[in-house]
Amino acid sequence: MTEWHDLARLGVATLANYEPGRPIEDVAREFGFTDPDQIIKLASNENALGPSPRAVLAMRAAAGQMHLYPDGGTFALRDALARHLDLVPESILPGNGSNELIELLGHVFLGPGTSLVMADCAFVVYRLVAAMFGAQVIAVPMRQHTHHLPALAAAVRPDTRLVFVANPNNPTSTCVSPAEIDAFMARISPDVIVCFDEAYVELLPPSRQPNTLHYVREGRKVVVLRTFSKTYGLAGLRVGYAAAPPACIALLNRIRQPFNVSAMAQVAAVAALEDVEHVERTRRMVADGLAYLQREFEAMEREYVPASANFILVHVGQGRAVFESLMRLGVIVRPMDGYGLPHHVRVTVGTAAENERLVRGLREVLGTGPGRSGL
Ligand SMILES: *Cc1c(COP(=O)(O)O)cnc(C)c1O
């Protein structure tokens, strides 16, 4: 009899699986923790302060309306975003997380005979989407764990449809400067689509904030992706958006599902957008947490990549082994061998108590007690 595998469309059977952060309940079951509260998850760059309180109130108030289908045109959310970003609503498309929008870009622009340019250690979903649509990936080496924009521009070929720039990048937590972006935009072919993935942009200080929406307003071939998953603390809801010239949004609209963003997510996102205090609190927590972690890694004589988002890469030797050992102590981080960084783990900035617990765990696992600096 034919196997399922043999019935799959060409290429599907060989696709790699995305390895997400281990869920707390999973780890509790596997390692025999009786109370999931004993476990902390610093693995998926979630907001340690929780969801925007305004979003929570709005969701509670909307719960009784969940028998109704969502607004398939996401009118209120697009309107709120348009005002927030100084764009026309036709320039905005909300999605089921910004990951859905990456896939929609693939649906519209990628296929056999096309290529996608990305940094070799950028967000892995770009690779997965390229593979999904049979496009070739042109992976450009990074410089000091940072996107090297001139090299990305130089790597563009006539068959290149999309160039992805994650800024700040995941998993390296590095960013490129506004001036570097302007130089890149001056140089890159006007016929290739540049997608700036700005999942953590709210965490950057004003002087590092990119002016990419300006290119959208100008009608350049630019797509800016943002999300409510990180700074706004709504990862579980799945809502993000694309900002691009209306002609691009119109194409994406053709292939999306009619109700791709749930009613609950739309309500929460509108409320979260107004929650300036939550964003501010989150910024402060991340800045304080990063300063603490970087200090501690220095005290432990561990190299790290200077971070600009709510997570940090630290050199621990055997990354996967350290990830496993930390998990036994109830601390979930992310191994990085899948990104070609087998000696690092990625740690999400948590609350002060969580960060201290991570540091204690790391010292225990690496055999560098408090106050000692052995390697
Ligand atoms: C977390 C993340 C996303 C996306 O997330 P969604 O939850 O799908 O909105 C997108 N890009 C980068 C670089 C990320 O780190």
Image (cartoon, rainbow, N blue to C red):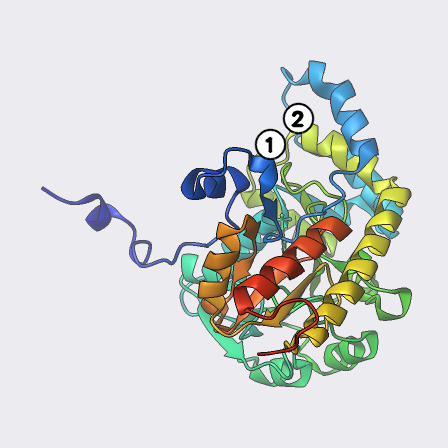
Query: Looking at the picture, which amino acid does disc 1 mark?
Result: Phe
Q: Is residue 285 left or right of residue 306?
A: right
Left or right: where 43 falls relative to 51 = left
Q: Position of residue 61 (x, y in %)?
A: 78, 19
Tell me residue 290's x, y (percent): 76, 63
The Cα atoms of the two marked residues, 1 and 2, are separated by 6 Å
User: Residue type at mark 2?
Assistant: Pro
Residue in the image at 61% along x and 46% along y: 40
Quadrant of residue 12 within the rendered picture: bottom left
Q: Tell which residue pokes out farthest to the left in this image.
A: 1
Q: Residue at x 72, y 60 (%)?
A: 198
Query: Tag 1, which secondary structure?
Result: loop
Quadrant for residue 31, please give it.
top left
Dot 2 falls on a residue whose secondary structure is loop
Position of residue 114 measured from the top left corner of the image (x, y, whole percent): 47, 69
Disc on res. 117 = none
Q: Circle 1 sits on which residue? A: 259
Q: Residues within 10 Å of mark 1 (few under 14, many from 20)?
A: some
For the C terminus, give its image quadrant.
bottom right
Residue 51 at least partly seen: yes
Task: For label 2, count other residues whose C-alpha is less than 10 Å away and answer few (under 14), some (14-19) or many (20+).
Answer: some
Label 1 close to label 2 by CB (< 8 Å): yes
Question: Which sits in the foreground, 66 or 42?
Answer: 42
As drawn, the label of residue 70 is 2
Q: Earlier in the sequence, mark 1 or mark 2?
A: 2
